[in-house]
Image: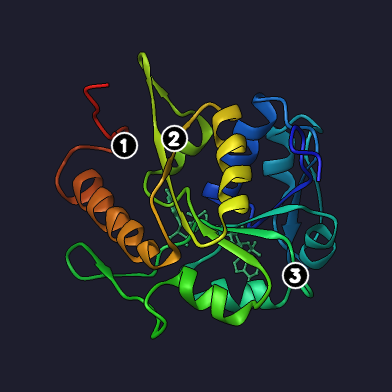
């Protein structure tokens, strides 16, 4: 894998997937491909990217990728990942949240404990990481707010994969934070619950993101 310019597939070119693509292209990543389903409406997302991102059927995009961002409805995440074919050795970044709604967001994880844990159980030999799930798509597209940048906590069990993703996150203009083992993905999914509550129910609006404060 080229650590400087890895081959990246983004499966699910919706709000999050297309915002990640815009950010990666703006940061100079040149090998970004959308992985789509047959019949998927992709023209608008591609047009916004000025020809700098291509699209192919999701299994084909994943086969050619070192790093795969999965950004699909939470209930579809495991099936969508399994439909990609043999991903052994690749890094899968789980951006998804398992949520229902009852006057506000409610965490509704699968029996494995988080979507990330369910993905890891379904994909042996694949290096699954949780990241990019704790703020709204506006920040995926643009991590800066004044002088500071959004934090991207990463949970997962593979140290090399985390180092690779951290380098990508840094180069893309965010601050990576090692949030510990894959079991902590459940905590990151609950950060999303809190973010959605604050942004959409609590009146803060979508232009907010969590930041770890540090005295140095
Ligand atoms: N929106 C946010 O601000 C935000 C922030 C953080 C995390 N998230 C999480 O990120 C994920 C994506 O959210 P989103 O807002 O981007 O959703 P979205 O706009 O509805 O996009 C979902 C994308 O997934 C594709 N898709 C659906 N089912 C699929 C399948 N079985 N296989 C492959 N692709 C499939 C859809 O394409 P087609 O239907 O056209 O095939 C679409 O491009 C969710 O899990 C959400 O919880 C969202």
Ligand 1 contact, mark 1 (Cβ < 8 Å): no
Q: CA distance from mark 2 to mark 3?
A: 30 Å
Which label number is shown at residue 209? 1
Residue at the spot x=44%, y=36% of the render? 138
Q: In screen coordinates, is 105 left or right of 186? A: left
Image location (x, y in percent) of residue 114:
40, 72
Q: Residue furthest bottom?
A: 111
Mark 2 vs mark 3: which is more N-terminal?
3
Name the residue carrying label 3: 88
Q: Quadrant of ligand 1?
A: bottom right
In this rendering, is residue 136 above or below 159?
above
Residue 163 is situated, as x and y percent measured from the top left of the image, at 58, 44
Q: Residue at x 60, y 81 (%)?
A: 122
Q: Which residue does the numbered mark 2 point to in the structure image?
A: 139
Quadrant in the picture for the C terminus: top left
Q: Which residue lies at the image location 83% right of the left edge and 62% below the top edge?
A: 63
Q: Quadrant of residue 204?
A: top left
Q: Which mark is residue 174?
A: none
- Report crowding for label 1: few under 14, some 14 to 19, many 20 or more residues within 10 A (C-alpha): some
Q: Which color scheme is applied?
A: rainbow
Quadrant of res 70? bottom right
- CB atoms at circles 1 and 3 under 8 Å apart? no
Q: Tell me what residue is drawn at x 74 percent, y 64 percent.
A: 89
Q: Bin the neighbour count of mark 3 within 10 Å (Cα to Cα): few under 14, some 14-19, many 20 and up.
A: few
Image coords of residue 107 (percent x, y): 28, 69
Q: CA distance from mark 1 to mark 3?
A: 33 Å
Whether tag 1 and tag 2 are in contact, CB under 8 A, the answer is yes
């Amino acid at each position: 894998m080229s650590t400087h310019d890895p081959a990246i597939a983004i499966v699910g070119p919706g709000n999050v997937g297309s915002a990640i693509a815009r950010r990666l292209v703006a940061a100079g990543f040149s090998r970004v491909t959308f992985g789509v389903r047959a019949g998927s409406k992709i023209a608008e997302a591609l047009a916004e990217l000025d020809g700098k991102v291509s699209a192919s059927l999701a299994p084909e995009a994943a086969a050619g990728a070192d790093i795969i961002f999965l950004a699909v409805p939470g209930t579809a995440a495991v099936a969508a990942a399994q439909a990609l074919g043999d991903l052994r050795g690749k890094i899968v970044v789980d951006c998804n949240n398992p949520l229902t709604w009852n006057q506000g967001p409610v965490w509704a994880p699968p029996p494995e404990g988080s979507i990330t844990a369910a993905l890891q159980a379904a994909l042996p030999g694949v290096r699954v990481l949780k990241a990019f799930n704790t703020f709204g798509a506006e920040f995926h597209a643009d991590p800066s707010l004044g002088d500071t940048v959004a934090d991207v906590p990463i949970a997962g069990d593979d140290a090399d994969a985390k180092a690779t993703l951290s380098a990508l996150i840094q180069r893309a203009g965010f601050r990576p934070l090692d949030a510990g083992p894959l079991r902590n993905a459940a905590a990151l999914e609950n950060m999303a619950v809190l973010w959605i509550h604050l942004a959409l129910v609590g009146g803060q609006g979508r232009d907010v993101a969590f930041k770890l404060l540090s005295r140095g």
